[in-house]
Image: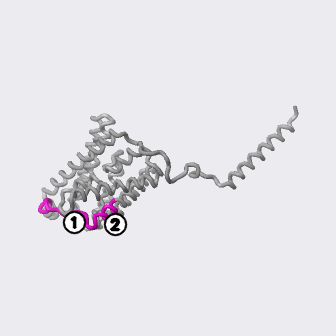
């Protein structure tokens, strides 16, 4: 119980520090620099900073849900996920320069967050942190299945996550935040035993690429190519096209999207004709 309290306290400390730095960045940086760099770096710091609980699956999933709820309520437009940044670029919502800046900021935040987590473990506030320090340099791969299956799992998680994200992009945060948090929690519970269920290339790079058991190319295929492929599949399924690459809709017809039933159209036309006849009779009956 003491270890859980320590991790929760550390989690809120990280959130509080990142919120303070975010407000400071807003005042010191231009809107463009803040949008592309600061908020992405701070969100990435929040994303990886609270790691390191060492608890059972029920506690970990509960903390994960709360983590994403807090992130969703305070993300301020930041994604902390390269696949989301690439998706925004493909949807013409972000320029190439802004996307590149976001990816660089995510990389910097990833490095800072991982360094913060290792510093936190070095304090050895719990028994788990002591163990983590001993095995930090000898960690094993998070891929516990065949390579093609692992890439499929990460791609599938990314597909469903981005599909829900696209569906809720215009929704009120009151509904969007808990649904996304529940989606991430469910996907992590389902796919975690196979790959760790990162479906976030930056987070996976920081936490598992240095571990033995898989090659660098294996990690790239599973944790970068898999999620990017899942994002592209979700985008094509939802949009029918990829605006940055081609405008032609491959799946949906714009004419049939809001098609009105023929019976309703006929009834509407008949109603207009009756109204015109009544108006004409009324004008003829008036004295000249």
Determine the image quadrant of residue 28: top left
Quadrant location of the N terminus? bottom left
- Give the farthest residue toward the left: 134
Q: CA distance from mark 2 to mark 1?
A: 26 Å
Mark 2 vs mark 1, foreground winner is 2
Question: What SS does tag 1 mark?
Answer: loop
- Residue pictured at 24% horizontal, 63% vertical: 142
Q: Which mark is residue 130?
A: none
Depth check, front residue: 260 or 45: 260
In the image, residue 45 sits, relative to residue 56, either above or below, namely above
Q: Which mark is residue 190?
A: 2
Which residue in the protein does label 1 denote? 1
In the image, residue 105 sits, relative to residue 206, either above or below, namely above
Residue 16 location, x and y as percent?
A: 26, 48
- Give the farthest residue toward the top: 288
Question: What SS does tag 2 mark?
Answer: helix
């Amino acid at each position: 119980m003491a270890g859980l309290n320590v991790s929760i306290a550390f989690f809120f400390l990280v959130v509080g520090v990142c919120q303070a730095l975010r407000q400071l960045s807003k005042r010191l940086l231009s809107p463009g620099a803040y949008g592309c760099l600061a908020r992405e770096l701070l969100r990435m710091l929040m994303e990886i900073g609270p790691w390191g609980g060492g608890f059972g699956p029920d506690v970990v999933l509960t903390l994960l849900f709360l983590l994403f709820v807090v992130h969703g309520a305070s993300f301020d437009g930041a994604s902390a996920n390269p696949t989301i940044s690439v998706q925004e670029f493909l949807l013409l919502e972000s320029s190439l320069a802004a996307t590149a800046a976001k990816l660089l900021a995510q990389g910097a935040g990833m490095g800072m967050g991982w360094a913060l987590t290792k510093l936190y473990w070095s304090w050895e506030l719990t028994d788990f942190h002591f163990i983590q320090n001993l095995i930090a340099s000898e960690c094993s791969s998070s891929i516990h299945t065949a390579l093609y299956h692992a890439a499929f799992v990460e791609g599938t998680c990314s597909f469903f996550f981005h599909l829900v994200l696209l569906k809720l992009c215009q929704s009120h945060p009151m509904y969007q935040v808990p649904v996304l948090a529940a989606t991430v929690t469910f996907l992590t519970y389902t796919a975690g035993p196979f790959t760790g269920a990162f479906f976030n290339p930056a987070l996976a790079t920081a936490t598992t690429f240095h571990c033995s058991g898989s090659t660098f190319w294996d990690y790239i295929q599973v944790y970068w190519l898999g999620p990017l492929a899942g994002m592209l599949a979700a985008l094509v399924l939802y949009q029918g096209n990829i605006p940055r690459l081609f405008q032609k809709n491959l799946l949906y017809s714009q004419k049939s999207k809001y098609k009105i039933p023929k019976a309703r159209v006929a009834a509407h036309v008949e109603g207009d004709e009756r109204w015109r006849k009544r108006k004409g009779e009324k004008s003829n009956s008036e004295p000249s």
